[in-house]
Every structure is written in structure tokens, then in C-alpha cells.
Image (cartoon, helix red, strand yellow):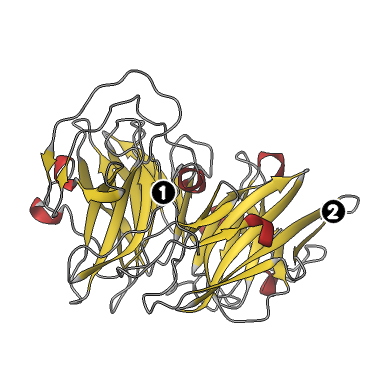
Amino acid sequence: MLSFTATLIGCGGGGSGSGSSVVSSGPQLVDSWPIYAALSVNGTSYENKNDARLDRTQLDKFVSNISPISVTFGDFFQEGQFSAFVVFNNSSGQAGEVHFLRWKSSESRWVDDSDRILSRANNNGSACVSSQYAITTDFNLDGKPDVYLACAKTSQPVEQLLFLSQPNGSYVRQTSGFMVDGKSAAALDINADGYMDLIVSNSTSSSSLPYSVGGEPEVYLGSVSNGHVTFPVQRNTSKLIARNLNNNCTGNNVLSAIPAVVNYVGVVPTTNNRKDLILGSDSSLAWLMDLGPGSSPRYSVCQAKLFEGIIDVATLTDVYSSVDAGVAHFYLARKSSPLSMRISRFTLNESSNPTIFHVKQEPQPQSALISASSSDGVPDLFKLTSGYFRAYDAGCTGNRCNALSVALSTIH
């Protein structure tokens, strides 16, 4: 295990100033921060996650009955540095809470400054009963980061949540307008209309298609009116994936090309500026090629391939992609138990005339097993920083948790 410090100041920026001291609802006193030009928001949730220049991101439990479950980053305070949106689940089975945290460099710790930008009146600061996965993008097109929060069902599928930036700098909670059993989500402009759209997992799908066992990914096409975000085109999976009922796609078995129950969705950059789609279940993963923003559908099962070499059962928690010498690689973090996670590398082999794709796992030892002696578990999300995969989320909840690092060179 390695220990390291963090810097949250983003690159670029203009002049400087200082903010006033603020007492938050949490236990810490927030001191002054320098003010820089606000950081921009990227066009996909993946880019927003991996552009956060953070080394240390672990978050300890700071209220006795709530535990952090997911975190996403953005310049929520519009001051030229990354802050954290943290989702906490409540151990009592009630709705959890969301908090906006900053990194206090002078003390090397996160502090809660939620009250500056988040009112808790009328449940505005409430999360889901079973929050799962938070992502950042600019849904309301005001140039500031917003958050989508995937929520798992209770007894039935539930509405998902958004936290949207306002002209006065505050954040307002809004429900999604659709109900799913959400485990994860990805955001991008699928149909090139200028609005951010969602691809969401739905583990309790109502699909009536004869070849679907349930749990297909679903697409929600976004729109914005007077700052209010809506998703008027809902459950329109055909906008995402063209099912080929006649199984005419050369080299593909349509029925097995997509996992039956998708609990992970990710949109990742690959070769030729594509934003390919990764769909995952506990026993199979699929890659779908991006056909381009002007294509309808954006992804097709005719360009889908299962990841080869996966024979175990483990939950896909995160994907990192890189392109080296024109070849795309996927680094998958998969958790087989609360204390065991493996990061493995897969290569996307592309050939033409005829066009053939394979997603093959690299041979051992190009895989790294991560384990922890702490009963608090292993963080679920990772990002690449200075040649190391760093723990990225708030899944490690106890004081004994250490930030975990795995050298990229051990997986290459």
C-alpha cells in the first residue's frame, strides 16, 4: 500500500482572490480558499471523472449513522478547483444525504461546506434510500457541473435524482421523471442535438422482448426548458442498440452478444475519437462500437463483442480506457468479494477487410489482485494518476481504510 497527498487545484485559470470563512453543518470550520477561473465541464461523464486531477480521494465516515457510497467531482463552487459531491446511505433504511466537500490542503482533509450551495429545506439535500452511483455532467447547459444519482429499487423501481446548478450558485434537487432499478449510468449527447442524454442500467427491466431476460440498458434523451431538465424520450432502447432479430450480423451471435442483466454501463473513449459502450453483468461483459453522433442508432449489436477470457463471477465496478500506438485497451476493476478486487487489462483488436473485432484479456501477469485486511472493504472506483490506479470513491468507510494504489506497470 502507498500513501500520498492530494492537490485539487485545477489547471489553467485566471486571477485570484479569497473566499470568506464558512461554518458548515458538519463538524469542521472551513477556511479561505483562493479563487481561480471556474473549471469547464466535459462532454461525457467518463471524461469528467478522469479529468479530476486528484491523488487522494478516500472519505471517512463523518456522521455516525451514515456511510459514503459514491462520489463524483466537479468545480461545484465555481472557484477553479475540484470539489466533491458525496452520497451517503443511511443505516436506518431511510433516505440518505448528499454533501458538497472541499479539500483543505493545510490539514490534508476533506471538509463539509454544503451549506454554501445546498439548502436542506423540503428534502433538497436528500439522496435515495438505496443510492448507488453518481456521475457529473452539465445537464442544464449553464456551463456548471450537475449530478445524476442512480438509485436502486426498494420494493419497486424508483425515480432517479438530479442535482442541478442554479444561477445564484446553489444546487436544487430534481427527480428524473422515470422509474428504474438503477445501479449505474453514463451521460453523453447520444443523438447530437446539444442536450445531454442518459444510458442507465435497469436491473428490473419491464422489457417484453422475447430474447430479453430483463435488465437491458435504457436510454433517456434529455431536453432543457427554462433551466428545467426533462427526459421526454424514455426507455427508447432502439435509439441506442439495434437488435438484429434475424441474426444477420456476420460473426455475432445476437442472443449472447449483450449481457442479459446489465448492472454496469460505461461510455469510454477509444480509437478514432469514438466513445464506445461497455455493458456489464456479474458474469459477462460486452463492447459496442460507437457508430458516430449522426448515427441512429448510436450503437448496434452488429458491432458488439463479448469480452473474451472472463470465466468467473464478479461485479464490474469501473472501467478505464487508454489508446496506445493506435490500439485501445480497457482496464476493468471487478470485485469478487468485499475484500478482493482485480484490475485486468483487455485489448481491443480491430482488423478490416473483412472487419473483425475481438476484446481479449491480456495474459497473466497482466492483471493485479487488490485485497485489504480491513473489514471496511475495497474502494470500488479507480482512476489513473501519475502511472498508478488510485482509489477514487467513498466506498471505504472506516478510519482504518487506506488509499490503495496499483502501478499501471504491473498490469501492462
Label 1 belongs to which residue? Answer: 5
4 displayed left or right of 97: right
Mark 1 closeness class: few <14, some 14–19, many ≥20 residues within 10 Å: few
Question: Residue 373 at what x, y percent from top left?
Answer: 44, 78
**Position of 45 compared to 107: left or right?**
right
Q: Is residue 299 above or below residue 342?
A: above
263 or 333: nearer the viewer:
333
The residues bearing labels 1 and 2 have C-alpha atoms spaced at a distance of 46 Å
The image quadrant that residue 179 belongs to is: bottom left
Q: What residue did someone put label 2 on?
A: 355
Q: Which residue lies at the image location 36% right of the left edge and 40% below the top edge?
A: 82
Tell me where residue 115 appears, x and y as whole percent. Answer: 14, 45
Q: Earlier in the sequence, mark 1 or mark 2?
A: 1
- Hey, what amino acid is under mark 2? Thr
Q: Is residue 362 visible?
A: yes
Residue 156 quadrant: bottom left
